[in-house]
Image (spheres, grey):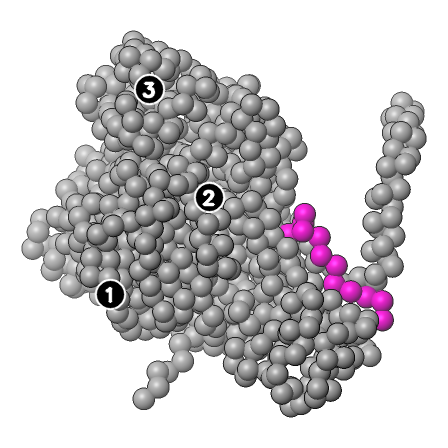
């Protein structure tokens, strides 16, 4: 599975619709505190970054789970926590370097982003497309193209100028 | 017995008494049927709690009431709004209400409340920290004197992931046009709510909640929210509807400057001119965004993201939020200041100091006109030459006002009171209604707009009921809303057409403010304004969304009745504070001067308001509302809306 949730902070307007969409589709309520995606904000500077589980290939959460409650869902590529197996020991919370898994306010068990089974609703509802669910290689190529443009900027400008004069 | 589940709303009102440092809660569910929540609920609570005829703005008995509404904090597009209501220091009507975006409204609900009522007065600078059921009174001595954005950063460090509602030095020093702020771009702007907080020694309200908002039919609710979002963003929905999204989402409110300037609506040079200002290139939305814009900023769940974050370079380099059209018009057009960097700096200063940019702009543009006409000299402003467009003088003046230093002590009283002190000729230059200056609208350019500004209980502004259908001038829509095509003709004085039109928008705006959603998306801007069917669609969406959220069925008629009820209470409050027909008349400038300017739609110059014809509209409006010839709601009118208690109090005092 090569798809991931790609975050572009420059596009995020900080509306936090992703949070309430997530809590709605997973838990049937509007509650950012129950969302598996959170928007991290620097309110005094006008910066906001949506962030969620990165679904690591070699998942530290899975490796450290004593109950073997965390497995990868082959269809979506998401790391899934089996609620009935989870001990609520929070080892995954302690070991995850990114803050992916969180403790449910309602059950005390750990919950996390499950990519909505392969069609993440935070992504499809994001009004600014600041979060995308895309092929990671495609994303890499986008970045590469943006960087490579710097090497041929002059040439591109000249071509544009030529076309304008036509 | 456990409490029954409340849908949409949260079921509780939190009351905070700053004098005693205590709090209590009260059942809110009994209000939903007749008031929904939000603004409408605020009105009845203020009326019940406070002796509205007598209490002065800075008395401890005055209250600041904050309410959200059943759609606030949900997936509904633009569900970040909440309403503040209080007895206000700026308008002489004494009525204070303001509506604000950001995410404080939702956080009030996540804390478990529909409403927070703040009364009393703390003995020293205090902030209140609310974390679900825990309410703490914290020392704010170290924050006193600090700016709103700086305080936000400090408080969010102290209480991670909280939402902050905060005043600046202007509020602390009881400047009559001090505001209350949250995040970089959102404000409870008008009427001086910041000074009311300051009078209570309340620096900030800090909220962090973990309670969920439950929906009556969660699946259908989410489905309709998605449909509305799609329609709001649809580039093919209709020309007026779709250009609204295109322009607002890219350039925000400053993007409308030239658009509304086309009818002469943009005021220039302290309302002495209007329309298109040739020199405004740098403070027009597109230029601002393309030159200094960093990114878009949005209120809670809003797809429109009409706010901007910007960064400037040069002498006044800074990073800030906004500005709104109201700010560029007030500090730019009205003061003849075309310099983008300076307008942005002034906007940022107002935000940090906690000053309402509209009234601050009106104060300065009034000073400039008085100076220009020789009514004051530089000595009046501590040596600052108040010549048109003197941005550096403006930058020096704002902190003096916020800290009441030197001439700032008088200027903190606002243009209406300063004008009155200077004499009749000076007061005639102040473009106000009920003591509060107008937002960026030249009201001589549209008679319905004039009517809504003149009537607005808190003073001159567009958010009471500026009738969009008049500005877009769509005959079908005008007939649909009022029965008369004249409702859509800018300079028509048709009494029934104009009064029906304004009443409709006033009730509609009460409604969005009572739901916890943004009126920009539901009537105030061009959305749903291409044809009557679009407006039907809007009503269908609204009544369904409210039903799926709350489980209570409301028809369009029932919803408009809630708006009507809310507006009547507002009127009763200002009537009890002495407002009568004479206060609903347009200001001196509107009645006595024509307005020159450049614009393609309306006659040049715009004629003065015809007093005789205007009175006929007022009379028709009073009749429509069920008011007597002085504008006092009759007992019959109030009783028919179930406001017997309100009627009893009103008639025991007038």
> Residue under circle 1?
B22
Which sits earlier in the primary sequence, circle 3 or circle 1? 1
Nearer the camera: disc 3 or disc 1:
1
Of residues B25 and B10, the one nearer the viewer is B25
Residue beneath the point at 46% across and 43% down:
B150
What chain does badge 3 belong to?
B
Residue beneath the point at 49% across and 37% down:
B324
Q: Give the range drawn in magenta.
A: A1-12
Left or right: B102 as drawn, with respect to B374 = right
Task: Kindly indicate the quadrant of the structure image that contains residue B373.
Answer: top left
Residue beneath the point at 43% across and 46% down:
B151
Q: How far apart are marks 3 and 2 (CA)?
A: 28 Å
- The disc placed on residue B367 is 3
Nearer the camera: disc 3 or disc 2:
2
> Residue under circle 2?
B149
In the rendering, at what x and y percent does residue B486 appear? 41, 38
């Amino acid at each position: 599975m090569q798809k991931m949730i790609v975050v572009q902070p420059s596009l995020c307007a900080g509306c936090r619709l992703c949070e309430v969409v997530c809590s709605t589709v997973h838990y049937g309520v509007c509650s950012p505190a129950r969302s598996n995606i959170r928007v991290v904000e620097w309110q005094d500077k006008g910066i906001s970054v949506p962030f969620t589980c990165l679904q690591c290939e070699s998942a530290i959460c899975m490796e450290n789970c004593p109950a073997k409650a965390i497995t990868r869902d082959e269809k979506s590529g998401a790391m899934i926590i089996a609620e009935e197996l989870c001990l609520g020991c929070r080892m995954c919370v302690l070991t995850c370097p990114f803050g992916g898994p969180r403790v449910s306010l309602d059950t005390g068990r750990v919950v996390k982003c499950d990519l909505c089974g392969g069609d993440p609703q935070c992504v499809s509802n994001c009004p600014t497309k600041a979060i995308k669910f895309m092929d990671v290689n495609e994303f890499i190529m986008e970045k590469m193209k943006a960087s490579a443009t710097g090497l041929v900027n002059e040439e591109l400008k000249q071509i544009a100028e030529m076309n304008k004069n036509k | 017995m456990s409490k029954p589940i409340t849908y949409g709303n949260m079921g509780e009102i939190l009351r905070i008494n700053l004098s005693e440092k205590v709090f209590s809660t009260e059942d809110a569910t009994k209000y939903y049927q007749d008031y929904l929540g939000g603004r409408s609920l605020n009105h009845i609570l203020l009326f019940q709690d406070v002796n509205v005829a007598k209490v002065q703005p800075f008395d401890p008995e005055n209250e600041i009431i904050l309410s959200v509404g059943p759609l606030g904090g949900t997936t509904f597009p633009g569900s970040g709004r909440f309403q503040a209501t209080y007895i206000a220091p700026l308008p002489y009507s004494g009525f204070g209400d303001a509506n604000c975006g950001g995410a404080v409204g939702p956080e009030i609900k996540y804390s478990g409340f529909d409403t927070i009522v703040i009364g009393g007065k703390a003995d020293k600078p205090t902030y209140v920290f609310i974390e679900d059921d825990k309410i703490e009174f914290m020392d704010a001595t170290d924050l006193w004197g600090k700016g709103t954005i700086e305080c936000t950063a400090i408080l969010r460090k102290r209480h991670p992931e909280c939402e902050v509602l905060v005043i600046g030095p202007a509020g602390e020093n009881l400047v009559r046009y001090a505001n209350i702020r949250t995040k970089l771009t959102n404000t409870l702007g008008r009427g001086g709510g910041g000074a009311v907080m300051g009078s209570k020694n309340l620096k900030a309200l800090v909220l962090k909640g973990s309670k969920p908002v439950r929906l009556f039919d969660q699946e259908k609710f989410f489905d309709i929210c998605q449909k509305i979002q799609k329609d709001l963003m649809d580039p093919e929905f209709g020309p007026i509807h779709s250009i609204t999204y295109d322009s607002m989402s890219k350039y925000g409110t400053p993007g409308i400057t030239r658009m509304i300037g086309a009818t002469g609506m943009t005021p220039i040079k302290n309302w002495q001119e209007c329309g298109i200002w040739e020199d405004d290139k740098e403070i027009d939305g597109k230029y601002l965004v393309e030159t200094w814009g960093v990114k878009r900023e949005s209120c809670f769940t809003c797809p429109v993201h009409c706010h901007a974050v910007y960064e400037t370079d040069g002498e006044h380099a800074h990073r800030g939020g906004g500005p709104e059209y109201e700010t560029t018009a007030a500090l730019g057009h009205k003061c003849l200041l075309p310099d983008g960097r300076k307008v942005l700096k002034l906007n940022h200063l107002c935000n940090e100091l906690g000053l309402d940019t509209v009234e601050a702009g009106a104060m300065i543009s009034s000073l400039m006109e008085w100076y220009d006409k020789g009514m004051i000299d530089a000595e009046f402003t501590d040596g600052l030459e108040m010549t048109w467009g003197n941005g550096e003088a403006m930058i020096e003046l704002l902190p003096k006002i916020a800290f009441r230093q030197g001439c700032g002590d008088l200027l903190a009283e606002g243009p209406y009171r300063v004008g009155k002190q200077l004499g009749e000729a000076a007061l005639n230059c102040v473009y106000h209604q009920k003591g509060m200056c107008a937002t960026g609208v030249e009201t001589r350019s549209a008679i319905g707009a004039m009517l809504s500004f003149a009537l607005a209980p808190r003073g001159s502004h567009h958010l009471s009921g500026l009738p969009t259908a008049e500005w877009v001038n769509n005959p079908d829509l005008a007939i649909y809303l009022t029965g008369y095509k004249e409702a859509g003709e800018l300079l028509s004085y048709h009494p029934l057409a104009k009064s029906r039109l304004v009443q409709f928008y006033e009730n509609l705006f009460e409604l969005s403010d009572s739901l916890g959603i943004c009126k920009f998306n539901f009537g105030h801007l061009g959305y749903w304004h291409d044809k009557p069917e679009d407006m039907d669609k809007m009503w269908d969406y609204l009544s369904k969304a409210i039903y799926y959220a709350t489980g209570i069925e409301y028809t369009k008629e029932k919803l408009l009745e809630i708006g009507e009820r809310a507006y009547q209470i507002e009127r009763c409050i200002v009537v009890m504070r002495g407002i009568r027909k004479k206060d609903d008349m347009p200001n001196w400038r509107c009645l006595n001067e024509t307005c020159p300017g450049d614009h393609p739609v309306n006659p040049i110059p715009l004629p003065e308001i015809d007093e005789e014809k205007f009175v006929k509209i007022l009379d028709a409006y009073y009749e429509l509302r069920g008011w007597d010839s002085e504008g006092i709601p009759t007992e019959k009118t109030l009783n028919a809306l179930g406001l017997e208690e309100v009627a009893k109090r009103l008639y025991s005092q007038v």
